[in-house]
Amino acid sequence: MSEVVMPRLSDTMEEGELSKWLKNEGDEVAKGDVLAEIETDKATMDLEAFEAGILEKHLVEAGTVVAIGTPVAIIGDGTGTADASKKDAPKKTAEKDAPKKDAPKKDAVEKDAAPVDEPPESPLVEEPSTTASRGQLSEEPPAAPESKTPAKLRMSPVARKIAKDHGLDPAAIAGSGPQGRVVRADVEAAIASGTSAARQTSTASGAARPSTSGSIPESDDEVPVNRIRKVAAKRLTESQAVPHFFLTSVVDVEKLLAFRTEVNESLQPRGVRVSVNDLFVRAAAVALREHPEANSSWGDDSVIQRARVNIGIAVATDAGLLVPVVHDADQKGLDAIALETVALAGKARDGKLSPDEMSGGTFSISNLGMFGIDQFTAVINPPEAAILAVGAASPVPVLRDGALVEVPKLKITLTVDHRVMDGAVASGFLRDLVGVLEHPLRMVL
């Protein structure tokens, strides 16, 4: 008999939500079988069995947030000797999701009763540009609902994202999880059954509420924070304790853009398209190989120069900011980098990144040029020593051969950990990076 524990599935993971059991009690399992789905701070991953046997006991319910190393199930020989009880199962961490201590059980609550010790709530209204949020939308007490749908929507982050992607109203989906929590299986079932995507557009009193994107709500809405954003907030707060400085350079990208056009024409038969960001990944990799000081991290009493050049690329997702990593970018051509960045960005938005694809970064790039941002400073992603912020290219008047011409230029800003690099060292790296960008053939020579 052995315990199945909550594993560490990413370098920043401290806890995970067991969102769905895929094996039931009494099922026979083989080594490597997927027992459950785990939602971490970055993605949804599989919990695998490390030995064969009979799944004798679930120690936690689906929808429970569990700390790393906590037992979640027992695999035995099927004799039923496992006596583990769910009384010691971890409590759910989200205060909004946990029932009050003295609250009656779900089955004992009348359908028109409000949660104990909480004011009555109005039905949730989902704005077109956001996910469903919690909070009172009217000062008037709500009318008695016609169904047993919980007054407060409980929904896992992954389920919420899938529902949004398919245009489903989360409040219209029946939840099968604890306290009526909507889990991914419920959303998938709703999609399969062709659930209507009609949105709720009125409050409990029947008054119409404006649904224009960007409109100010009638009252404060409390938006739940998922684990990705919680972890990002924690790590970015830690980053502010790092003594850092900023260096900005202007890059003439006329040759870079022309080079990209030629590369894409040559790669067109293979269906590969190189982006400007891919060029920055490759250029940074070349410059980092020449400046190992910039490819380093702080080790309390030493500076650790990394043997591999692994570049993280910031990707915005509905769940929050993720930074998948292009490993060994200095050893890959532009075509390989282009294919990999597209695949990584897609996985990031779908919540399918593996731990390896999010770990081991030595330098990061954040590009907001596509949003028309001219210049910004990015926050260092610990334990890396630097991050590059890339702005938008704009035409700048330049005097050339006695004539005034427009040349596309953009600004790049390097955020540097001052413990690892001094200003002169960081300036040398940035100077050579600009040189690679302005003479792009250096990327392939």
Image (cartoon, rainbow, N blue to C red):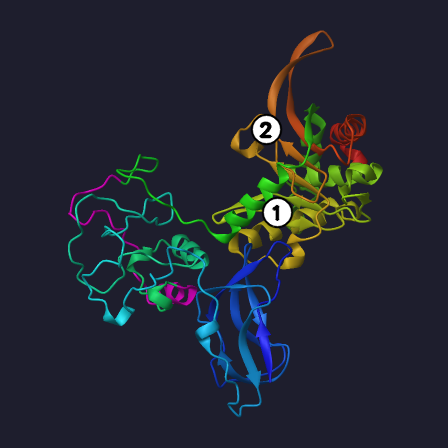
The answer for how far apart the CA atoms under marks 2 and 1 are is 18 Å
Q: Position of residue 190 (x, y in %)?
A: 34, 65
Label 2: state its secondary structure: loop
Considering the image in quadrants, where does the C terminus appear? top right
Q: Quadrant of the N terminus?
A: bottom right
Disc number for residue 416: none
Q: Secondary structure at mark 1?
A: loop
Please name the residue that numbered disc 2 is placed on: 376
User: Of label 2 and label 1, which has the lower sequence position?
Assistant: 1
Q: Which residues are magenta?
A: 183-210
Crowding near the residue tagged with mark 1, few <14, some 14–19, many ≥20 C-alpha atoms within 10 Å: many
Which of the two residues, 131 or 26, is positioned nearer the viewer here? 26
The residue that appears at 38% across and 45% down in the rendered structure is: 130
Residue under label 1: 323
**Residue 401 quadrant:** top right
The x and y percentages for residue 2 are 61, 81
Quadrant of the rendered image containing residue 391: top right
Amino acid type at mark 2? Phe
Q: Is residue 390 above or below residue 39?
A: above
203 drawn magenta: yes
Q: Is residue 61 something one can see in this rendering?
A: yes
Q: Amino acid at mark 1?
A: Val
Along the viewing direction, whichever of 324 and 18 lies nearer the viewer: 18
Q: Residue furthest top?
A: 402
Residue 358 image position (x, y, % from top left): 64, 53
Residue 333 lies, with reference to residue 284, above or below; the image says below
**Residue 413, above or below 53:** above
425 displayed left or right of 81 = right
Q: Is residue 75 above or below residue 249?
A: below
